[in-house]
């Protein structure tokens, strides 16, 4: 009996420890490539890469993890204390698709820029005498990203996250004229002696080798070191309250396309994350001339499609013909002009097409369609094509014919009531009645023709 209770006690104790570890270890292990800058072979050798595994803990202290992995390709194993869960990811266990992660050594150093220089103390604290690491993680969706600075006691593999910068907008698109918010959140370990609410934030823009400062804020002095660029806004209350360093562009313009860098400074530490913004505006289309002239068979008709107000400049223009039978066939791309750029940075382009109406399919008429394929979406516009002697009357023409017939019918009735006598002159009345009868017969024939035509149109 004593043996039974002893076995139960051991089982419950083991289960409790396992449950405690399972509840605190709430993040899946993260595979990272450790970048070793000091590669063997001299200065000209590229850095080596070691496959590493990060066990991430969001609660409690570091747990004792096995120093070996069942995967023989894993060369380094670390445990990471991450209270804010900034390195957590949601990839299913065993999934082939995983977040991309790079891990490298980091060297703390003083900052010399104006808005972060005041954060650095005169003497480096003993706290900096440790092994420091930097991790950059990109989520599987390509939109989430994290940059973390971690500290480990010298010679150990137990890392503590000290500073993390995260975003949900690694890659973003926006329409022209709309407000755009570039997400940037940061978390600093409140237990770290480096934090103490001393931080600075900097936003920079880069495109095609050119860059500029958008905003610089000294959180220690609570002041802007540089005036923000016109049209950019930051919520400073949210920045101090919960680390929301997001930047809002109030009205997206074409020249906002490019790379944005959110940098967060602590004393001796810097974490940054890079985002890519693209302004995408689909084109407006018009066909000239509109409406098309009414040509004869055998003539050549030139039409032009004008695409304007689009960005970026990538665009494919083509022509189609929708025949009376409802079938659509391609007419090719026509003759394209070069791109023209307007004052607001958007582009325009034309496509010309010559319609040879000796072609039976063109001579039968239909609908000429201009198609524009753009990263912002596909756009279409069309005009009707009618050729003398071939094209069937349109619905508008049919309605006009019905109207003429009704007017003619009313005129006949008016004549019959007004000019056909009743009584004295019966012979003259008989002649007029015969004339009226003939008019009625012709009117009935006209109605039959119109009715048959409308039946064919259906």
Image (cartoon, rainbow, N blue to C red):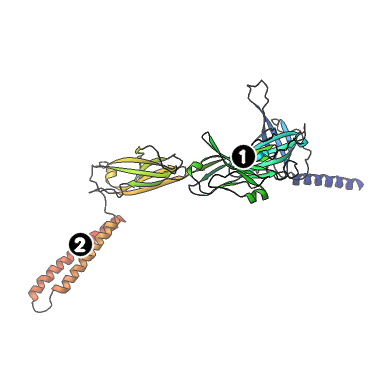
Crowdedness near tag 1: few (<14), some (14–19) or many (≥20) residues, C-alpha within 10 Å: many
Q: Is residue 53 above or below residue 454?
A: above
Query: Percent x, y for residue 145?
Result: 62, 41
Query: Percent x, y for residue 238?
Result: 64, 50
Residue at image coords 79%, 44%: 18
Crowdedness near tag 2: few (<14), some (14–19) or many (≥20) residues, C-alpha within 10 Å: few
Query: Where is residue 11, by image quadrant?
Result: top right
Residue 287: which numbered mark, if any?
Answer: none
Q: Secondary structure at mark 1?
A: strand
Disc 2 target residue: 445
Disc 1 target residue: 273
View extreme (bottom): residue: 424
289 on left or right of 204: left
Tell me how far mark 1 sits from mark 2, CA to CA.
81 Å
Query: Percent x, y for residue 245?
Result: 62, 46
Q: Nearer the viewer, residue 443 or 242?
A: 242
Residue at image coords 26%, 52%: 392
109 on left or right of 170: right
């Amino acid at each position: 009996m004593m043996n039974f209770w002893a076995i139960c006690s051991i089982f419950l104790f083991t289960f409790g420890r396992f449950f405690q570890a399972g509840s605190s270890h709430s993040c899946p292990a993260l595979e990272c490539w450790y970048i070793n800058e000091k590669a063997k072979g001299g200065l000209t050798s590229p850095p080596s890469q070691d496959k590493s595994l990060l066990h991430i803990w969001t609660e409690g202290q570091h747990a004792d993890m096995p120093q070996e992995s069942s995967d023989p390709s894993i060369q380094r194993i670390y445990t990471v204390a991450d209270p804010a869960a900034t390195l957590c990811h949601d990839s299913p266990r065993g999934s082939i698709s995983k977040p991309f992660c790079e891990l490298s050594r980091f060297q703390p150093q003083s900052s010399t820029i104006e808005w972060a220089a005041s954060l650095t103390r005169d003497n480096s604290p003993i706290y900096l005498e440790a092994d420091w690491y930097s991790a950059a993680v990109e989520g599987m969706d390509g939109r989430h990203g994290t940059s973390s600075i971690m500290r480990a006691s010298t010679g150990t593999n137990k890392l503590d996250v000290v500073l993390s910068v995260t975003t949900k907008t690694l890659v973003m698109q926006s329409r022209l004229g709309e407000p755009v918010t570039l997400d940037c959140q940061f978390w600093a370990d409140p237990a770290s002696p480096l934090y103490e609410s001393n931080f600075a934030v900097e936003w920079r823009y880069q495109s095609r080798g050119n860059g500029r400062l958008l905003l610089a804020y000294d959180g220690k002095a609570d002041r802007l070191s540089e005036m923000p660029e016109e049209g950019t806004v930051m919520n400073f209350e949210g920045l101090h309250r919960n680390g929301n360093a997001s930047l809002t562009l109030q009205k997206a313009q074409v020249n906002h396309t490019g790379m944005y860098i959110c940098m967060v400074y602590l004393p001796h530490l810097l974490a940054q994350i890079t985002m890519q913004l693209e302004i995408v505006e689909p084109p407006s289309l018009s066909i000239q001339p509109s409406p098309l002239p009414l040509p004869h068979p055998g003539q050549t008709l030139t039409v032009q499609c004008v695409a304007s107000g689009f960005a970026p400049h990538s665009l494919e223009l083509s022509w189609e013909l929708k025949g009376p039978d409802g079938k659509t066939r391609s007419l090719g791309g026509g003759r394209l002009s070069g791109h023209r750029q307007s004052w607001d940075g958007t582009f325009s382009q034309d496509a010309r097409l010559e319609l040879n109406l000796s072609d039976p399919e063109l001579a039968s008429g239909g609908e000429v369609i201009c198609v524009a394929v753009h990263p912002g979406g596909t756009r279409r516009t069309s005009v009707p094509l009618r050729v003398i002697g071939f094209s069937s009357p349109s619905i508008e023409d049919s309605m006009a014919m019905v109207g003429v017939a009704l007017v003619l019918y009313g005129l006949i009735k008016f004549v019959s009531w007004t000019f056909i006598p009743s009584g004295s002159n019966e012979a003259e009345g008989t002649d007029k009645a015969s004339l009226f009868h003939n008019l009625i017969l012709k009117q009935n024939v006209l109605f039959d023709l119109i009715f048959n035509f409308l039946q064919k149109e259906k």
